[in-house]
Image (spheres, rainbow, N blue to C red):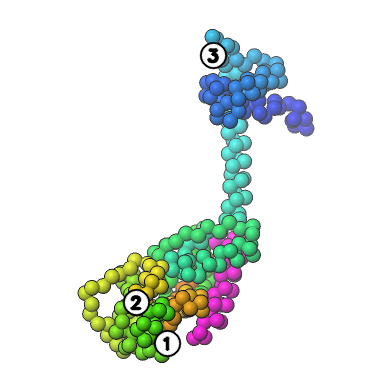
Amino acid sequence: MKRLISKLPPHKALIAFEAVVRLGTVTAAAKELTSTQPAVSQHLKNLEANLNTQLFKRIGRLLHPTEAAVRYYHSIEPLLSSMALASEQLRREESNANLVNIVSNCGLAHFWLLPMIPDLQAKFPQLTINVMLSDSADYHSDDSLLLSFGKLADSATKHTLFAEQVCAVSSAEYAADHNLSIGSSPAQVAQHSLIHMDESDSRWLNWRNWLQYCDLQLAENKNLVLLGNYHSVISAVQQGQGVALGWLCLMQHLLESGKLVQVSNTVVSREGYGYFIDTGGASSANELLVVDYLKAAAAKNLANLPNN
């Protein structure tokens, strides 16, 4: 084994030989190898010279492997395939070592996580961040960090990012046109066009619940439009279509930039509800780097919220 290099044929010759025998023609082998017919033919000649054995017979315009070539092919093909598989597995392991999967609630991703991605990449340039979106309450993965909303219960794998704080928000233009301000009462807010999200998911506070916390009842309205996700709700608000519920942790940059305004100083917080990160089975050093980054970013956001 000390002089392995002197005992093995050139690897390009072996690869060309394997492809020609498997595919049947030099033309097909050259196409698969993104090479040329003369180059593949030269590799075959080099292999024959190295092995001192005739490997192909030409019958008419076709090359046919000799019995020695067929025996040799069946001996080396499994070894070449095994080498290729081992090499690919090693590449995949190295690539996956730097991959961090994040499955995020859609609203949290759009308004909080995605704006931070450039900074996250700058701090950890060695990482590949793969963000997937899901609003499912039942999502579970052993190889992803989960950013979700629901009942809070800190544990070894589950960490609170934001406790729920929900206020009423509108565009600045809508507020000005309808005499709304942060000093407006919930009863005044309820007199305006309220933008609703689909109420099928009981985890989320809706207008009926929010007003009940304010000892008010939502007026019956059969002409409702229910929007399917929070991004759509806030998009409608920015277009001046009415007032929506705003989770302060998500609306912070929109409020600070003046793109949205708070139209009542009433903030509803249900005990034990909020956004959290669940590490599940993810525990690599790179995943823990991202977890610590997100927890620190959440703490910074909380310190800057107007109601803290």
How many numbered marks, from 0 up? 3
Q: Is residue 246 magenta?
A: no
20 or 1: which is nearer to us?
20
Report the residue marked by disc 1: 182
Query: Which segment did they paint magenta?
Result: 281-308
| Residues packed near mark 2 inside 10 Å, few (<14), some (14 to 19) or many (20 plus) | many
Q: Which residue is mark 3?
A: 62
Could you tell which of marks 1 and 2 lies nearer the N-terminus? 1
For marks 3 and 1, give the one nearer the viewer: 1
Q: Is residue 87 above or below residue 165?
A: above
Q: Amino acid at mark 3?
A: Leu
Residue positioned 40% across, 65% down in the render: 135
Amino acid, disc 2? Gly
Pick the residue in front: 119 or 268: 119
Outermost residue to the right: 2
Give whichever of 68, 290 is nearer the camera. 290
Image location (x, y in percent) of residue 3: 77, 30
Instruction: Name the quadrant containing residue 84.
Output: top right
For label 2, the residue is 242
Q: Amino acid at mark 1?
A: Ile
> Measuring 64% from the left and 26% from the top, which residue is drawn there?
14
Quadrant the N terminus occupies: top right
Residue 222 position within the rendered picture, expressed as x and y whole percent measured from the top left: 21, 74
Residue at image location 60% in from the left, 15% down from the top: 56
Q: CA distance from mark 3 to mark 1?
A: 86 Å
Magenta stretch prevailing secondary structure: helix
Percent position of residue 225, x then y: 28, 70
